[in-house]
Amino acid sequence: MSGFLMAAYHSLFIAAAEAVGTSVSTALCMSTAIVGSCVLGAVVLDDGVRSSTMCGVALMLMVLGTFGSCWCKEVAHYMKSAEERSPILQSLEMESKWSSASGAARVFGVLVSICAGTTGSALLLPAQLGRVELAHFWPAFGLGAFAVTAAVTLASAAMTRSVSHLRLPTEVVAGAILAGLLWMAGCALCLIAARHVGFGFSQSVFSCQMVVTVFWNAQGSASLRGFAQRLVMAGAGLVCAGTILLSAVVHA
């Protein structure tokens, strides 16, 4: 079941990114997953929450850090433009795909992003509920993800009546396999952590993955310099502060 949810999560995320762009879909998806994971842990798995107020503050810090990291380029461009004009006159311009999207496409993209985040928050819930052993989790997770992905691929080929898009270079296939193995390893580690510190905390922290991605990209990317890089650092700092606070108020 977790493999099915992972394939659905990635499919929904890709659909949202195609509709409204990467920065908007990523921020909404990850933020929904962070909050949803904590809520599922408290409601479904009875994770203890010492203070709901402080838990809300911790989640808010993690969400703000996620938005800051995902929107670092857009906010940096806004701040640079606001120096030349009044900040009131200068609007926050998102990426071109969001700007060119119609109103219906924006609503669709936002809803699909939220659905993707909700699916991502429940990614390991079946395994945690069933207390699945790690030795059984790995093959079942891989088979579930493979089955759903193969079904989607075959359905796409049947609808388009073409298999040309299935002929991929060897390096692309190798990269995809490596990415799948890394995802399985990350999910397995998250499942181990959930057994010790609780599902809500471990899955919420796991859902901050995009902040880590942007943080590492900022170290070697020429496009993330100056204020954008400082914004990424600030976002990562907020996520770390939220994680520390969440660990103090949420327990298994």
Image: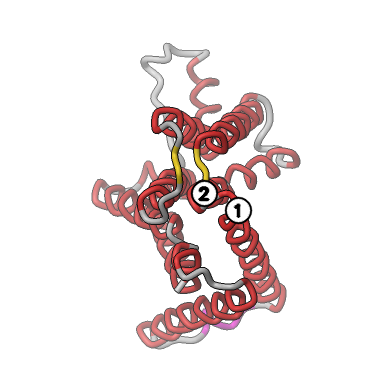
Q: Is residue 123 left or right of residue 239?
A: left
Residue at the spot of label 2: 252
Place of residue 181 in the rendered image (x, y in percent of width and height, measured from the top left): 67, 70
Range drawn in magenta:
164-168
Kind of residue at disc 1:
His
Where 134 falls versus 54 (above or below)?
A: below
Report, in whole angstroms, how far the alpha carbon at label 2 lies from the one at label 1.
Answer: 7 Å
Residue 87: tell me if it is visible: yes
Is residue 166 one of those drawn in magenta?
yes
Outermost residue, right direction?
Answer: 220
* Residue 235 badge: none
Identify the residue shown where x is 66% and y is 65%. Answer: 185
Q: Is residue 21 left or right of residue 187?
A: left
Place of residue 162 in the rendered image (x, y in percent of width and height, measured from the top left): 45, 86
Residue at the spot of label 1: 196
Dominant secondary structure, magenta: helix
Image quadrant in which you'd find residue 228? top right
Kind of residue at disc 2:
Ala
Where 232 falls versus 129 (above or below)?
A: above
Is residue 130 one of those drawn in magenta?
no
Where 54 falls versus 169 (above or below)?
A: above
Q: Nearer the viewer, residue 204 or 64?
A: 204
Mark 2 or mark 1, earlier in chain: 1
Q: Nearer the viewer, residue 63 or 91?
A: 63
